Amino acid sequence: MAADIPAFTLNDGTKMPAVGMGCWMGGFGGGARVSAMVKKALEVGYRHFDTASGYGNEEQVGAALRESGIPREQLYVVTKLGGSGHHRVEEAFEESLAKLGIEYVDLYLMHWPQGDCDGRTLQPEDAPTFIDTWKDMEKLLGTGKVKSIGVSNFSIKTLTELLPHCKIVPAVNQVEAHPFLPQVELKNFCEDKGILITAYSPLGRPPSGQPPTVPTEGVPSLLSNSTVVGITEKYKVTPAQVLLSWGVQRGTPVIPKSENEERMRANITLLHLDETDMKVLDTEHTKPGLHRSLMSYHSTIGGQGSVFGWTYEQMGWNLAIGGVVP
């Protein structure tokens, strides 16, 4: 039975369940672990699943969904266009759809604004630009094989460059968002444009997968943060429930990941935080050293902070080296 969770209505009228299961396993692939996780999540009541071509597990996610016997219309499936697909959008989408083995995708996202070709990261001025790629994504809607399209990891800068060229405004912008990086300006900008922010890594994430090139020692933890823990004692819930409920209550769907059934159940059980607790969490990032990204993908280019071949300046990210705001 599906869990009783709210849904958000996108700018095209479709609905997205407020809590989903993120299928990035901390490294490429995941095999049997992904399959077991998705099957368990379906049993617990999850109906929203988020994967990507770059995760290397679309086949396992799709197989678990199909084998569940749950009607397709009761599921919400998200996948993403990888950088190597920016110059071949239709083909890349069809490859993802075939791996998933389902009739259609509910939401297809451009995973990052930067594409790559022949092993080289395309720079903002190189063709195809993310504007070119978006125009090709718009064409997918006419196939009936995707319900909605959107972007991921876009900033106010990159959205401002993209939006004047859009026939279809992105339905979603999926970004890292949590009390240490609430993305307030970006959230307000997107809401003004009718774009829904979806929060990935809403619980933070310990470094995993490929080792970062920027030190991660001393990176603060959301789950053990004293403010979060203090609120859990008031409501008699887990730190994750507090963080996810904050995310949904402020108007952002959340896609945590867990392979543990007990935590899965807790994560999909939302509570209502009172106004005082919401404000406390809203301002937690203003404490010294806490306004920062918790991701491990940060690196450097020529002494500047960067991510996947673009500097923070090119990305439009207001961060110093290592994802920390100066």
Image (cartoon, rainbow, N blue to C red):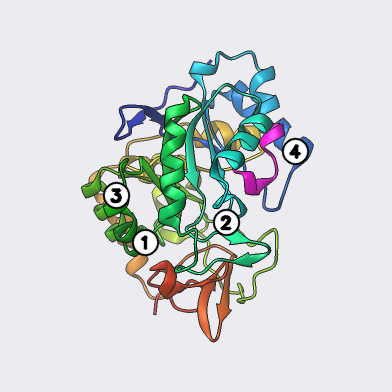
Q: Which residue is mark 2?
A: 205
Task: Say which residue appears at 52% left-offset and 67% top-offset.
Answer: 220
Query: Which is more N-terminal, label 3 or label 2?
Result: 2
Q: In what element is the residue under mark 4?
A: helix
Residue bearing the label numbered 1: 158
Q: CA distance from mark 3 to mark 4?
A: 35 Å
Circle 1 SS class: helix
Q: CA distance from mark 2 to mark 3?
A: 22 Å
Q: Residues within 10 Å of mark 3 (few under 14, many from 20)?
A: some
SS at badge 2 = loop
The disc, 2 or 4, on the residue closer to the chain's N-terminal end is 4
Front-lying residue, 174 or 47 = 174
**Marks 2 and 4, how far apart in space?**
18 Å
User: Residue 208 appears in which quarter of the rendering?
Assistant: bottom right
The numbered dot on residue 104 is none
Q: Mark 1 and mark 4 in contact (Cβ < 8 Å)?
A: no
Which of the two marks, 2 or 1, is nearer to us in this view? 1
Q: Nearer the viewer, mark 4 or mark 1?
A: 1
Question: What secondary structure is the magenta-colored segment mainly?
Answer: helix
Find out whether the residues at labels 2 and 3 contact each other: C-beta distance under 8 Å: no
Nearer to us: label 3 or label 4: 4
Measured as percent of width and height from the top left, residue 308 is found at 57, 66
| Residue 225 against residue 36 in the figure, above or below | below
Callout 4, which amino acid?
Arg
